[in-house]
Amino acid sequence: MTDNNFIPSQITNEGEVHQLTVTNNSSVQPAILLRLGVFVPASRAIPKGQKSGIDVSSSFSQLEFARKEGYDEVRIFGERLNISTDFSVWMGIIGAFSKYGLKSNTIELPFTEFAALCQYDSRQFNKRLRDTIFDALTRIGTKTVQFNSKKTGDKFFTQLLKSGKYTRESDTITLQADERLHELYQIDYNILLRKRPYHMLKGKEVAQTLYTYIASLPDNPAPIRFDRIIERLNLTSPVKEQNRLIKAALKQLQDIGYIEYSIVKDGRTLTVLIHKRNKKLKELGP
């Protein structure tokens, strides 16, 4: 395995250079994954053991590795991941690689530090939490990315997380990532996801999932149709109930001061307009 940086120390956007860091308040998240429905409300996740394929060709085929090898069809398979535990652990993974993955794609750190990166309180650091986090790492490891070249017939697959290990004697976590996917965390695909809104919505999984989606959108996002949100949240209830859940989630995002929005109706089509996103949760102005 080469010593590629898994997460770069800087990103450049429109000629500007910014330091990209993970803090207690924010976590680097690849916008592609946030937009593709990888993390969903637990009650609406696909049953354990059932596989689901997501076509990500338009995004992943543009990665340097995919272009170089001629891969033009890309799909993600594996169990859907829940927005509560699995997403918290995913934030921990990104935080750990941001801090320690500058020289190698294999890192080792104390469990207590990793759990803190996952935003767990030190009072929860017990055997049950160790099992919970390792189970989440295992589920994340099921997310297989399959590349295919229509021209040559060549195929390749890897995982979002190649391997994870918990060593009881030293109480450490070891994680290994695939350098071929490092570009997911570079330049155009990076956003800074604030952790505070996510945790203010604890227990409100539809709102949490909607937050991760809205947070991944560019500045001044285009109007979002409800059917797109339904697809993103993997909602399967009757349409009337789906619309109710989305409206309630939007209201919850507004109540914590994250967004200002309005909903317009054209026949049976509902669309949400995001007027403001308060990324730092400061008081919204008039």
Image: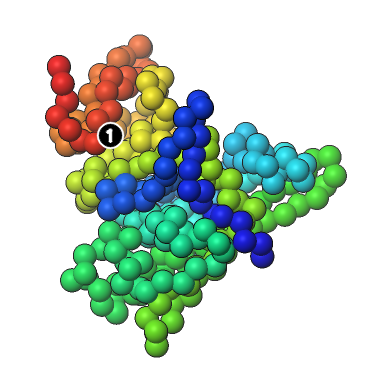
Q: Answer yes or no: is residue 123 visible.
A: yes
**Residue neighbourhood size for the residue with mark 1, other residues' Cα within 10 Å, grouped as few (<14), some (14–19), many (≥20):** some
The residue at which mark 1 appears reads as 279
Colour mapping used in the image: rainbow
- Going 50% across and 60% down the picture, which residue do you hit? 101
Q: Amino acid at mark 1?
A: Lys
Q: Nearer the viewer, residue 78 or 158?
A: 158
Residue at figure coordinates x 31%, y 14% from the top left? 265
Looking at the image, the residue that sits furthest to the right is: 152
Q: Quadrant of residue 149?
A: top right
The C terminus is located in which quarter?
top left
Seen in the picture, residue 244 relative to 91 is either above or below; the reply is: above
Choose between 23 and 159: the one closer to the eye: 23
Left-right relation of 173 to 276? right
The image shows residue 247 at horizontal and vertical percentages of 25, 30
Image mark count: 1
**Looking at the picture, how far across and down is residue 282, in whole percent?**
17, 33
Q: Residue at x 77, y 46 (%)?
A: 69
Q: Is residue 163 above or below residue 190?
A: below
Task: Tell me the quarter of the picture where residue 168 sits.
Answer: bottom left
When asked about the image quadrant of residue 237, the answer is: top left
SS of the residue at dot 1? loop
Instruction: Work out whether residue 51 can be spotted.
Output: no
Tell me residue 218's x, y (percent): 42, 27
**Who's the residue at 80% across and 50% down the image?**
154
In the visual, does 252 lie left or right of 238? left
